Amino acid sequence: MRVMALIECIPNVSEGRRTDLIESIAAAIRAVSGVRLLDYSCDPSHNRSVFTLVGDRAPLKQAVLALFERAIEGIDLRRHSGEHPRLGAVDVVPFVPIEGITMDACVALANEVAQDVAARFDLPIYLYEEASSNPARKNLEDIRRGEFEGLATKMRTEGWLPDFGPQHPHPSAGASVIGARMPLIAYNINLDTDRLDVAKKIAAGIRHSSGGFRYVKAAGFKLDDRGIVQVSMNLTNFEKTPIFRVFETVKREAARYGVRVLESEIVGLVPSGALVSAAEFYLQLERFGSEQILENKLKGD
Amino acid sequence: MRVMALIECIPNVSEGRRTDLIESIAAAIRAVSGVRLLDYSCDPSHNRSVFTLVGDRAPLKQAVLALFERAIEGIDLRRHSGEHPRLGAVDVVPFVPIEGITMDACVALANEVAQDVAARFDLPIYLYEEASSNPARKNLEDIRRGEFEGLATKMRTEGWLPDFGPQHPHPSAGASVIGARMPLIAYNINLDTDRLDVAKKIAAGIRHSSGGFRYVKAAGFKLDDRGIVQVSMNLTNFEKTPIFRVFETVKREAARYGVRVLESEIVGLVPSGALVSAAEFYLQLERFGSEQILENKLKGD
């Protein structure tokens, strides 16, 4: 039985317009044996690209270093503008445990990569999310506040020395944020009403920032073309705040306004465990283990 | 992206006591490259062994032929007794589509293997389940009725000529049943009562044989040690008769007697699709496709 760790890594790079540079970064990733580039996309208005790669520790590290090399070489944030906030040429690099690896091991990998990148490119690195050792520096938004332009000042403020690297910004590449987190699930629940206030009140009730579930970010939106409203969410840790609990809470809160749930949707990818736990909940499954899932049994070699 | 079909094959062999023979069959399967022997177990009181192997068509066929060779060489049904009904030395061989393969292709494979086995070992073969072309010979129980001892007489009865091979039993190996079917799910629902009549009435209501769901076999049992009763089921096609529909029906029928569902349980393996469809149902998921499951995205290559 071959035991290989599978880690997802989603580097965000501050270039979304020059396709030659983006392609050269993709090529550098693809050249690393043991890494698969699942997807990459660039957003010209954000002036930002997102790469999704998977692999085991050693090849992922090699691919991330190659990505840093190309990005730092090719991007100068002093001449960069776009709608998306950014702190560095390589803005943020999360490692996500998928299979055969613990969160602790991903945190260790994030630390290792951070240390190597800092040393090799003389670049300040902040650790975030699960890799952060400082509660005030856990959220990406807090670390990125002030952006590249405010970085030199921020680094001189108490509590904002980087975790690795020099105590001043890299002149053209700023600083990077590296860390480990659970897979995100983009999850929306559509309500059979056009009352935006209902969606907004429910979103406020369930999101962490205003007293709701710890691993939920939420906002209320109107879907104008359909005449309905949506509670739009990011579930940041589906093991600790599972989909079914969020769904049932939204359903109950909506009922308080006489509103029904029309449907829900998952945007993009979802780990199968997030759906299996919903099946376990609703079917009241006891004595069930993930080793009973046929596909898991068939994996391994 | 490598496209490989994954088929499960679960040969049942009429020997559950002589471990040397069982081990030699296991060794013959393991010797085929491209086949994995996931599991095998023997039951001495049934005098029967069950092997679970997976692979693509060509290696599976090779492994099944090797299994037939050892079993026919080593087993003489004239001197075989056990609690489990049996027709042949190799009693039944189902092929189950798991991934990257249709049921039709598994039916074709069953036909091919049946033809080869019949020719090579001069053994009569009956096709069953999805591979059967005759509604009266679809169920294993119907084909096996009369067992090895009644086989010669049965084969002379109208409608019981085999699909392949000679028109008389093999002297020591009888006949074999080969076919294709969906994965079985062994699923139980435990009720918070000691009233066996309630479990029996619910089982009768949901099982196909007495008017219930097409792909459900069910019976009511007492769990004496816990003082409760169980509706014990086999779901024979989870795509057409999904778990959630069975669960909700049992729950509703139990409520009619004032009885609550305590829990449910899956015994053994379950394809992830069976659980994902339950999550889709209860979460009212729309616009969801299996390609959104992270693990599916990570497979391939």
Image (cartoon, coloured by chain):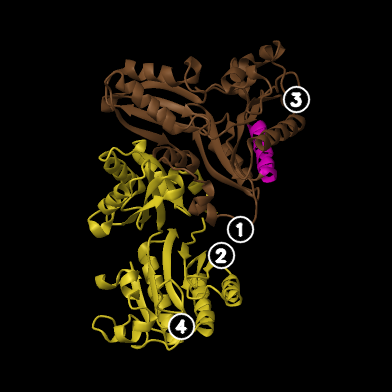
Chain colours: A yellow, B brown
- Along the horizontal axis of the image, is A155 left or right of A223? left
Q: In the picture shown, does residue B94 fall above or below B28?
A: above
**Circle number at residue A77:** 4
The residue wearing badge 3 is: B165
Give the image quarter of residue B229: top left
Contact between labelled residues 4 and 2, with CB atoms less than 8 Å apart: no
Residue sitting at x 64%, y 30%: B179
Neighbour class for label 4 at 10 Å: few (<14), some, many (≥20)?
Answer: many
Distance (Cα) linking label 4 and label 1: 37 Å
Q: Mark 3 vs mark 1: which is more N-terminal?
A: 3
**Circle number at residue B301:** 1
Q: In the picture shown, does residue B237 fall above or below A137?
A: above
Distance (Cα) linking label 3 and label 1: 41 Å
Residue sitting at x 52%, y 66%: A53
Residue type at mark 1: give it: Asp
Q: Secondary structure at mark 3?
A: loop
Instruction: Examine the structure image and report whether residue B169 is included in the region drawn in magenta.
Output: no
- Along the horizontal axis of the image, is B301 left or right of B218? right
Task: Using the image, name the chain to which the residue with label 3 belongs.
Answer: B
Q: Which residues are magenta?
A: B57-74
- Foreground residue, A134 or B67? A134
**Which of label 3 and label 4 is nearer to you?**
4
**What percent of the width, then of the height, locates residue B186?**
45, 32
- Along the horizontal axis of the image, is A172 left or right of B134? left
Task: Using the image, name the chain to which the residue with label 4 belongs.
Answer: A
**What percent of the width, then of the height, locates residue A281?**
34, 40
